[in-house]
Amino acid sequence: MRVAQDEIPGLWIEEIQQPEEQSDASIQQQFEAFHGLNPWVLDALEALTADCVNNGFAHVGIGMLFELLRWRYGLHTHGDPFKLNNNFRSRYARLLIERHPEWISVFEVRALRAA
């Protein structure tokens, strides 16, 4: 399933894939497994961020973007569960800044507490 979001250029919603549980995996390892299965999540967060920036937002909260993505997913999958781990927020913010260094002032990032 891949659904275009007409209101926001470049925003696509795809079916989420969950990696197998790894109880001894670090947050970073869990993130890498999730991101490897769902690269579209970063693209979707990028499209949402670009839309915010293009509409004059000086600052964007990655938490807000996560909630928007959850909402959009629910609308277009008729309520299918969308599990996006909040522990991944800071990693996605860093990847967005890596892709768009001009967004360094858009996101507030702190030192990672856990690897």
Image: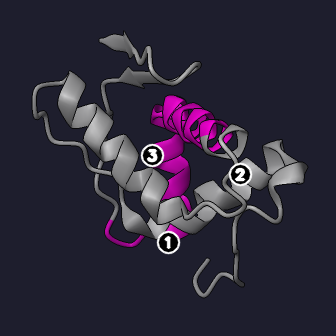
Type of residue at label 3? Phe
Q: Which residue is mark 2?
A: 95
Type of residue at label 1? Ser
Q: Can you say which quadrant of the picture contains the C terminus?
A: bottom right
Relative to 113, say whether 23 is above or below.
Answer: above
Q: Which residue is mark 1?
A: 26
Label 3, secondary structure: give it.
helix
Residue at image location 50% in from the left, 72% down from the top: 26
Q: Which residues are magenta?
A: 23-51
Q: Earlier in the sequence, mark 2 or mark 1?
A: 1
Label 2, secondary structure: give it.
helix
Find residue 66 and report its horizontal and vertical position in percent: 42, 53
Residue most extreme to the right: 102
Q: Is residue 79 magenta?
A: no
Local crowd size for mark 2, using a 10 Å CA cut-off: few (<14), some (14–19), many (≥20): few
Task: Give the foreground label among 3 and 1.
Answer: 3
Q: Is residue 49 magenta?
A: yes
Q: CA distance from mark 2 to mark 1?
A: 18 Å
Secondary structure mostly seen in the magenta stretch: helix
Q: Which residue is mark 3?
A: 34
